[in-house]
Image (tube, helix red, strand yellow):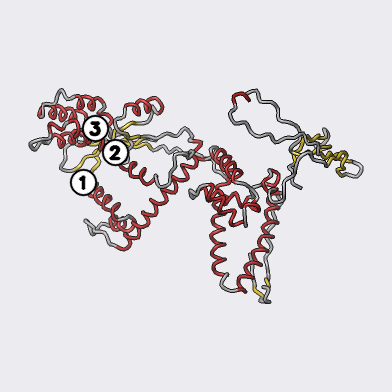
Amino acid sequence: MGFDVRQLYANKCKLDNSVSSFRLVCAKKGQRKPDKRDHLTKQPRAETRTSCQVRMSLKFARDIKKYVICDLELNHNHILQIPETSHMMPSQRKISEVQALQIDLADEAGIRPKKTHELTSLQAGGKDVLGYTKQDQKNYLRSKRKRDLAYGEAAHMQKKPKTIFTDQDPAMASALVEKLPETYHGLCVWHIMQNAIRHLGNKLKDGSFILRDFKACMYNSEDQFQFQETWDALLQRYKVEDNSWLKSIYKVKEKWAHCYMKKVYTIGMRSTQLSESFNSDLKDFMRSNLDIIHFLKQFERAVGGKRYKELQAEYNARQKLPRLKMIHSPLLKHAAQVYTPNAFDLFQNEFDWSSAAYIVSRTENNQMSEYQVAIFDKDGEYTVSGNQIRTQMIVQSDTRADATARYKNICFKAIKLAARSSDFEVTSNFVEQVIEEAYKKAEIFTSNIENQTILPLQSWNQVTTPNGVKLQHQI
């Protein structure tokens, strides 16, 4: 009729908690309460209430077991909405389950809300029949993101990174010490070398090898004593004992020298170049106003692109045969079949070194295994230790995420079915009839599940198309 309705009150029976009486009123009933902060408000909201007296009161008549109207007023003191604008009233707006799933998928794909609203409006036949406004969609996404924070990794489970590499930013170093004291802070070796070029420029003339010797301090020292000897030799050889940059970088040697990082979890990484390369790829998916949940979804999209490149590498691996250094090794033959060419080259090099290693001694207990390892034709021994305890984290899953995954799967199959059957009228009519019957069955089955009375789906023995074609079909 062109006006919004809200419930003014509802009384409940103390015996069985059922509603004994209630009153519905026009949404424009009453007046807005004065705002004590009104003098501070630059743009106050427009007034919407007019003290409209339209109401309908009902009470439950126990003798006839029905609600009866006991008070009614139908005369409004304001103009009503016209049919073309009635769809904008809050009481007429609602996002359905199917629409919510479409909004979720568009949000995951990085489609902006405005474009999503335009697309769903076109699918529905216009904004006036869509059933919700752009603001409703915005509010839905905000509520969804708040709800998502209660699930999965966003609840962060006090889980922190083991290692972080940065450049020589003192503010970042101080923040990491304060906020992540248990996380190892390493310095990016690429940034260190760039700083070395800048601060040691006067020593790079006439064929100087100072950068080569500095790299030797960084990578080639097996223990702290060897590092100190190499470092002292560097200072004396190039007469840089008073160089301020070398003094400052020496103070944080635990963050970049190999001998101090043997027990640090780095997976072989020593610089931020990998993350900076990935950051460059992330820029195609990111915006500055993303919240943590939306960021993680876009992050997964970027990771998906990386994984597709891995599939391309897998394709090339199956097209091109790798070169085996040890052609009779069954392990290398198997690795050549399962690894991509780049990964196999790395593995083959490590396998070659492993053949020269041997165990000198070992110590094992229930929690820790420790081995003394040596390499033929090389001096020194290495201690290799590992913790055998495995800790599993239980992460609560979002049930709606499962529903979204099922929705994607069904949509994919439905699109294939529509594309296959739409070429001919008889198949198109048949599919439409099957969909209608399937919808009815799904409604019944869903209701049974919600009411906790699960019944088995009945088989369909025969379906007759509009053209009289009888087909056997079974769910």
Q: Is residue 303 left or right of residue 38?
A: left
Q: Give the left or right position of residue 130, taking residue 335 as reference.
A: right
Q: Residues within 10 Å of mark 1 (few under 14, many from 20)?
A: few
Label 2, secondary structure: give it.
loop
User: Which mark is first along the chain, 2 or 1?
Assistant: 2
Q: Is residue 122 above or below residue 112?
A: below
x, y percent for residue 436 = 67, 63
Q: Which residue is mark 1?
A: 356
Residue 18, image x and y in percent?
81, 38
Name the mark on residue 257.
Answer: 3
Sequence-first disc among 3 and 1: 3
Q: Is residue 247 visible?
A: yes
Q: Is residue 153 visible?
A: no
Residue type indicated by callout 3 = Ala
Mark 2 Cα shell of 10 Å, populated few (<14), some (14-19), many (≥20): many
In which quadrant is the C terminus drawn? bottom right
Q: What residue did someone put label 2 on?
A: 271
